[in-house]
Image (tube, rainbow, N blue to C red):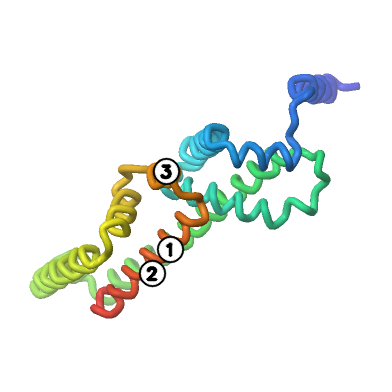
């Protein structure tokens, strides 16, 4: 047996011994996800990985984590109950992190193509030297900003505070769930409804 093969075998043995007696089954994972403290610990660990390894923003990492749980719940039955379901969930999380980065890269390529076309077709505008462009842009931005502020103000107090707390990073999803004293599904339903109301208002006012 080669040294490399021997080292791998030893590492695998140590890993099995380290996890001996540790329940990583589906049942154990569901218990962990139902325990607020253990869920917060798992959330913190995987989101740290997303930030440290992939450079993903905390709010995006939080969304990816909850998407990963939803995906896991749709596929866990394909695997034996006694398999390492914690590892399965983390694997799904890693995959979704990579998908998120791929989407951002696609957006970046589209933006770069737009800039290239602008430089080619309208170089004066691209250099910021169009005397009309900056003034018009400032007026439009000002009007849009006013419409956005009015749309946010038109929301209910709870919906407005919910959206602003998340957008400004003043509280995480889990912190808001705990503060409101509601379950995750109810929170997600309220958040989605608030976002849809705001989007509809902005579309009606021509901002979107």
Q: Nearer the viewer, residue 16 or 113?
A: 16
Report the number of discs. Answer: 3
Residue 86 drawn at (x, y percent): 68, 38
Which one is in front in this view, the residue at disc 1 or the one at disc 3?
Answer: 1
What residue lies at 45% left-to-right and 43% top-to-bottom? 174
Residue appearing at x 45%, y 54% in the figure = 187
Secondary element at tag 3: helix
Position of 70 with respect to 108 (left or right) is right
Residue placed furthest toward the right: 1
Query: Which residue is rendered at x = 19% and y = 64% of the image?
Result: 149
Mark 1, Cα crowd under 10 Å, few <14 / some 14-19 / many 20+, is few
Q: Are marks 3 and 2 in contact (CB under 8 Å)?
A: no
> How many C-alpha atoms fall within 10 Å of the one at disc 3: few (<14), some, or many (≥20)?
some
- Labels 2 and 1 touching (C-beta < 8 A): yes
Q: Which mark is residue 196?
A: 2
| Place of residue 115 in the rendered image (x, y in percent of width and height, measured from the top left) | 32, 66
Q: Secondary structure at mark 2?
A: helix
- Where on the picture, by quarter, is residue 196? bottom left
Alpha carbon of mark 1 to alpha carbon of mark 3: how far?
19 Å
- Return the mark for residue 192: 1
Dividing the picture into quarters, in which one does residue 74 lie? bottom right
Name the residue: 27% across, 65% down. 155
Relative to residue 24, is residue 147 depicted above or below? below
Percent from the top left, x then y, of residue 36?
Answer: 53, 37
Q: Earlier in the sequence, mark 3 or mark 2?
A: 3
186 left or right, relative to 69: left
Q: Which mark is residue 58?
A: 3
Q: Residues within 10 Å of mark 2 (few under 14, many from 20)?
A: few
- Asked where in the image residue 56 lies, by quadrant, the reply is top left
């Amino acid at each position: 047996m080669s040294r490399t093969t021997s080292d791998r075998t030893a590492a695998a043995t140590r890993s099995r011994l380290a996890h001996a007696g540790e329940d990583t089954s589906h049942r154990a994972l569901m218990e962990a996800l139902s325990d607020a403290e253990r869920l917060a610990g798992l959330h913190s660990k995987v989101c740290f990985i997303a930030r440290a390894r992939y450079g993903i923003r905390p709010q995006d990492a939080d969304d990816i984590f909850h998407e990963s749980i939803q995906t896991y719940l749709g596929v866990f039955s394909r695997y034996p109950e006694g398999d390492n379901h914690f590892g399965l969930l983390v694997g799904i999380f890693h995959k979704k992190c990579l998908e998120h980065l791929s989407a951002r890269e696609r957006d970046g390529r589209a933006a770069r193509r737009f800039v290239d076309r602008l430089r080619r077709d309208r170089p004066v505008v691209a250099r910021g030297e169009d005397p009309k462009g900056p003034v018009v842009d400032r007026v439009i931005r000002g009007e849009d900003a006013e419409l956005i502020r009015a749309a946010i103000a038109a929301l209910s107090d709870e919906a407005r505070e919910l959206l602003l707390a998340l957008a400004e990073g003043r509280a995480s999803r889990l912190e808001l769930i705990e503060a409101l004293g509601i379950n995750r599904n109810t929170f997600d339903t309220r958040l989605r409804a608030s976002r849809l109301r705001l989007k509809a208002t902005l579309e009606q006012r021509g901002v979107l």
